[in-house]
Amino acid sequence: MCPSYVRIRLPLAAALSRFGGWIGLPEIAPARDVTASKAVEEACDSNGNWRGVAVFVHESNGWTVFDDLTGYLASVPASRWAELAAGDELIFAGYNDSVPYGQLIAVRSGRVVREFLEDLQDPRHNVNRGRLDFERDSPIDGWIAAASFVDEDDLGDPGADDGSLWLFRRAT
């Protein structure tokens, strides 16, 4: 598995507008309503290949969540997440259990307050700065702990909820 998402504490309309400008990729298709269970199928062509960078967008308890279906957002550095967040709270989290790799970035008030990355295939990029309040009892100190954060974060899981699929053309 390789789930990842970014969530920002903004209403959906404001988050869509900000994300669309921030990602800097041309839109293949505007965001359109789909269910979470159909998002991957709708993001692929008839041969099962991704049509582009795909995010499934939904709201969850005061947050707008962008589920990264294609893995594109894993390459975004913490400083760029701070740009997207502006003055709002933001969490990016993801993992890939076949690599193995885990990442967590938290931004508050325009500052990166937590930056964790463990990539066992390329440890040169590993980083572990800051702590979040919940880490007093359960620190994120390895990719498995980052994966557990993703799997246990109810805000990041769309379940069977409705949302929108948004497709962008990859940068060349």
Image (cartoon, helix red, strand yellow):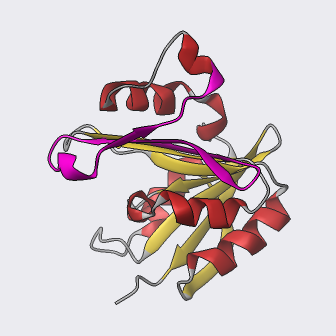
Q: Quadrant of the C terminus?
A: bottom left
* In front of the other: 13 or 28: 13
Q: Position of residue 130 (x, y in %)?
A: 53, 35
- Residue 78 lies, with reference to residue 80, above or below; the image says above
Measuring 74% from the left and 63% from the top, which residue is drawn there?
Answer: 86
- Residue occupying image coordinates x 30% and y 71%: 49
Which quarter of the figure is the N terminus placed in?
A: top left
Residue 121 among magenta residues = yes
**Could you tell whether 23 is left or right of 16 in the image?**
left
Report the magenta residues as a range: 104-133
Q: Is residue 141 above or below residue 103?
A: above
Does 170 lie within the magenta span?
no
Q: Residue furthest left?
A: 121
- Answer above or below: position of 30 versus 41: below
Query: Residue, x 58% and y 29% (percent of image)?
Result: 153
Residue 168 located left or right of residue 122: right
Residue 147 screen position, x and y as percent? 39, 31
Q: Position of residue 121 (x, y in %)?
A: 14, 47
Q: Position of residue 74 (x, y in %)?
A: 40, 57
The image quadrant of residue 81 is bottom right
Residue in the picture at 17% in, 50% down: 122
